[in-house]
Amino acid sequence: MGTVNCRQGQHAQMALSNKGSNIQGPWVRGWKSLWSGVGTTRSGLEELWGLRGHLCQHQEPASLLVEKPLSEWPLPQFINLFLPEFPIRPLREHQQLKVLGLVAKGSFGTVFKVLDCGQKAIFAVKVVPKVKVLQKDILRQCKEEVSIQRQIDHPFVHGLGDSWQGKRHLFIMCSYCSTDLYSLWSAVGCFTEASIRLFAAELVLVLCYLHDLGIIHRDVKMENILLDKRGHLKLTDFGLSRHLPRGARAYTICGTLQYMGKKKAKAGGKKEDLRK
C-alpha cells in the first residue's frame, strides 16, 4: 500500500493540471484518507541510504519508450506534490551521511546531527514524514519554508544547505551549530550588558533584512537563535515564516506559548492553522 504506478501517476498528473496549483482537491484528500492510519515503521533517516533513481518500474511498450523518454514520464503524485522545492536525489548524492545523534524533535519533524563522510563536515538534517505533511495539511508551509530559505543570504541567518525527498520523507539540510541562545543563557545564568547589546544589534539587522524581502519569521525565540563558533547569531527554523507582498498582513496566531502575551496566548490556545 502507498505505491503508485506510472499509469496512475499519469492520471493524477492530468487531474492536477486541470485544477492548477490548488492542492486542496479531492486527490489530495484521498491521499490524506489513505494514509491517515499509516505510520512510519523504519528509522526516520531510512532513506539516506535507501534512495533510488528509478522510482517507477512499470514497463511500457517499446514504441511508447521512443515517443516518451523515461525522463519525461509523469511522476507518481506522492512525489510530484513536493516538487520542485524537494527534488529527487539518487543514492550516490547522500549515501555518505552518517547519523551522529538527535538534535531536536519538533511538532512536524526531527532534526539529526549527521556527518558527511565525503566532505568530512557536520550538518543538521531535518526529517519530515510526507504522511504527516498531508495529514496536517501543511504542504504549502513546508514548500514555502524551503523557498524562503533559498532566497536568504545573510551572515546572521542559518542558511539552507540542501533539500530533497525520498519515498516517505522530506529532508532539509543546514550547517550545524552546537549551541543556541537559550542553552547558553541557561548555562551562564545571565548575559553581560555588552553581550546583550551585540545580540540585539545582530537580531535587529537580520529582521530588518528579512522584512525588506517581505519575509516574516513569526517564531523568533531564544531556542531559534543559534550561535556560531565566533559567538555570532544564526536565526533558524523558518517553519512558520511567510512571504507577504508589501502592505499585506498575516492574521494567524502562531508561535510558542511561552513567548506570547497572556491575551494572545488565551486567544490562540496552541499553534493555529498554518495555511492562513
Image (spheres, rainbow, N blue to C red):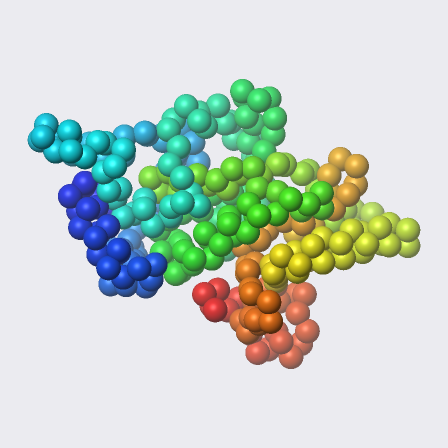
**Rendered image quadrant of residue 55:** top left
- Residue farthest to the right? 193
- Residue farthest to the front? 67
Indicate the position of residue 12 as horizontal and vertical percent values: 22, 52
> Can the viewer see residue 157 in this picture?
yes
**Rendered image quadrant of residue 179:** top right
In the image, 75 versus 176, the foreground residue is: 75
| In this picture, residue 166 sits left or right of residue 210 | left
In the image, 148 versus 259, the foreground residue is: 148
Residue located 34% across and 59% down the image: 21
Residue located 50% across and 27% down the image: 97
**Rendered image quadrant of residue 264:** bottom right
Name above or below for residue 243 compared with residue 43. below
Residue located 24% across and 42% down the image: 74
> Can the viewer see residue 170 in this picture?
no
Residue located 64% across and 44% down the image: 153
Pick the quarter of the image with the N terminus.
top left
Indicate the position of residue 40 as horizontal and vertical percent values: 35, 44
